[in-house]
Image (cartoon, rainbow, N blue to C red):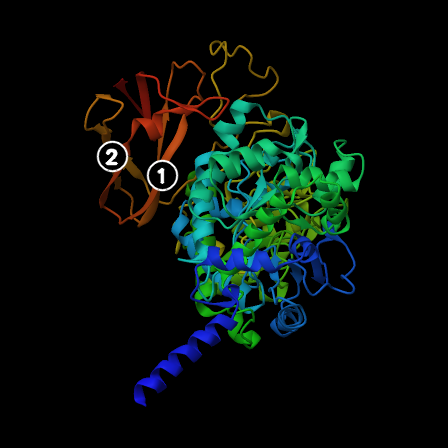
Amino acid sequence: MKKIAIVCSVLLSHLIVAQVPVYKNKTAPVEKRISDLLSKMTIEEKILQLNQYTFGINNNPNNIGPEVKGLPAGIGSLIYFSADPVLRNTIQKKAMEETRLGIPILFGFDVIHGFRTVYPISIAQACSWNPELVKLNCSEAARESVLSGVDWTFSPMIDVARDPRWGRVSEGYGEDPYVNAVFGVASVKGYQGKKLSDPFSIAACLKHFVGYGMSEGGRDYRFSDVSAQSLWETYLPPYQACIDAGAATVMSGFNDISGVPATANHYTLTEILKKRWKFNGFVVSDWNAVKQLVWQGVAKDEKEAGQKAFMAGVEMDMKDNIYFEHFAALIAEKKIPMSAINDAVSRVLRVKFNLGLFDNPYTEIVEEQSRYLQARSKELATNLAEESMVLLKNKSNTLPFNSNVKKIALIGPMAKDKENIIGAWSFNGKSKDAESLFEGIQKEFKNVTINYAVGCDFDGTNESGFAEAVAKAKESDIIVLCLGEKKTWSGENASRSTIALPEIQEKLVEELKKTGKPIVLVLSNGRPLELVRLEPLVDAIVEIWQPGVAGGTPLAGILSGRINPSAKLAITFPLTTGQIPTYYSIRQSARPFDKQGDYQDISTEPLYWFGHGLSYTKYDYSPIKLSATKINKNQKIMVEVSVANTGKVDGKETVFWYVSDPVASISRPIKELKFFEKKEIKSGKKIIYTFQIEPMRDLSFTDAIGKRLFESGDFYLYVNDQKVKFEVTE
């Protein structure tokens, strides 16, 4: 009887398992679950999975749209403009329990530099040269996102950007492909964790694929004249690195790539991304970008726009509802094959399965005080802000303040600001959470008198505050002048014809200069600025970017000397707007002598090059040591340089390793960054930095079809102000 009971029990368990569809079986392989679910779906259910709607209050002024009415329960994804997990679970419950198959919704949002705990903007993060710290910040942002009902972030932006008139330079990691790759990978790993199904992991989305940073004239949504060589050499490498790192999704760009818009570009979206790189996630369009194909002149109507975008390789349509409205007809007309629909739906489902949404579709309800602004989050935000602030100028060691500073004139529209300092794309950030520069300085300098005056607004012509600012300056020992940009002046749809500050701010500097008091200019902005008129008037300049909720204390620590600045620029500051584009990795001029071809009215040199950043200590570099000066392409060279901190304070120094190939079949940039490393060096101590040159990785280059080439010959290695030659043979 016992044996019979056991047999019956086994049979019953098998029967129960058999009744559970494979796609609901947690132990079944993901690909089998996808295949099983796909086989059960109707055409309408499949089409719904390829659409993304919005839900909640849309507080992006560039994406204004009414809240979606009559939300389809089977919708594939929502941009979730709320932070309420209860509401999210209510919507998800509708999908799980009121649809035939119970397919969970994927909730996405623009978590660009933090959710509620807002970190420094991305361009500032790159200036830290600390990708591990960026990874930790993204991990904390993912935790806050998950607890707010968000599974998917439209980040990181890894568009190589060399025109600071383009507002979206604030969202990326600067002018260099390698830097964008390194910080992009760090962000992906921070958001996605060890695996997507981890409790506090969210899916990353690489944007904007591809060449958007080359938008003509720095104007958003425009044509990008991207040569095939530039595409493979400059704009694709960050994406390939992040795909290799496991990025779950990709977003197509708004831009027109040399005549074929990014949203309808089969070559980039399918030939490169999916066939060559074997990407198995999905591509989402940018906001209304499918409809935009009509405005860009490559589709006669929305139906054709939907067909072109989808057949090019865009699986999910963000916002404009074109896929939902037209795909049934396009399938019936055999203009879209079911095989393509099935592949697209499989890609969307794969991300959902990998996130664990089928098995754990609901968000844990946690009180707000336990979700946001936790001690670890704020500490990480502070650390990143400290390492992101760049000391651009420090004439006669104006900084840090010495003991003779008893009264500080704290002046400028940014001094007490809490709204703009957190930066663009900080939707869930609240100004009340931010620490102003005034508060940080007041806390740091408890025994110093702070004489505050606003001086002027960010823009306009009202000079009535000048007199008070001058009076406060005259009765003080030093002036800390806090200027910069409103947060809406950078980010999406924030192109500017000039990168200079408004005239009213420049006039305030001129008036304060007349007092004869030393001036420390503190800048908070989302792009490089034109400082040609201001730089001669001030004694020190600290670029704090838009530091998020923790800006005041890090700045105050730099002013006092408690913090030794260690940041360096990840993007060049042109001397004037007219110099744009100016970036370090330019190609050699045809006449690089006697200043031929240079600007005749101004210097061709920018104000501050990529990699510029001062410290309160001095670093001495030893001569570069190479393990060999001649190798073949299958060998490696170990290179080292020792860096000594010969100053009186501890510091963190970033060593940049550049290479150049002076003669090649395709002309190469004057130099290219191949590796960087940041280390702390105690006062009086010395640290050895190393770099291994691998010829096929570091000395090869791509041609116009993406083929990597290596050509033997002489090469140069640059470190600091040193240059050494080595030879690589076949």
Q: For this view, does 474 lie left or right of residue 29? A: right
How many residues crowd around disc 1 within 10 Å: few (fewer than 14), some, or many (20 or more)? some
- Counting residues from the N terminus, which is met first, the one under dot 1 or under dot 2? 2
Query: Depth-wise, is mark 1 or mark 2 nearer the camera?
Result: 1
In the picture of the structure, the residue carrying the numbered disc 1 is: 676
Location of residue 140 in the rendering, given as x and y in whole percent from the top left corner: 47, 62
| Foreground residue among 320 and 82 | 320
Q: Is residue 433 above or below residue 626?
A: below
Front residue of 336/142: it is 336
Which residue is disc 2 drawn over? Answer: 641
Nearer-the-camera pick, 269 or 440: 269
Q: Residue at x 40, y 54 (%)?
A: 563
Instruction: Name the outermost residue toward the right.
Output: 301
As drawn, 417 above or below 714: below
Q: What whole-number distance in Å separates the C-alpha atoms at marks 1 and 2?
A: 13 Å
Rendering coords of residue 382 (x, y %): 46, 59
Q: Is residue 484 above or below residue 626?
A: below
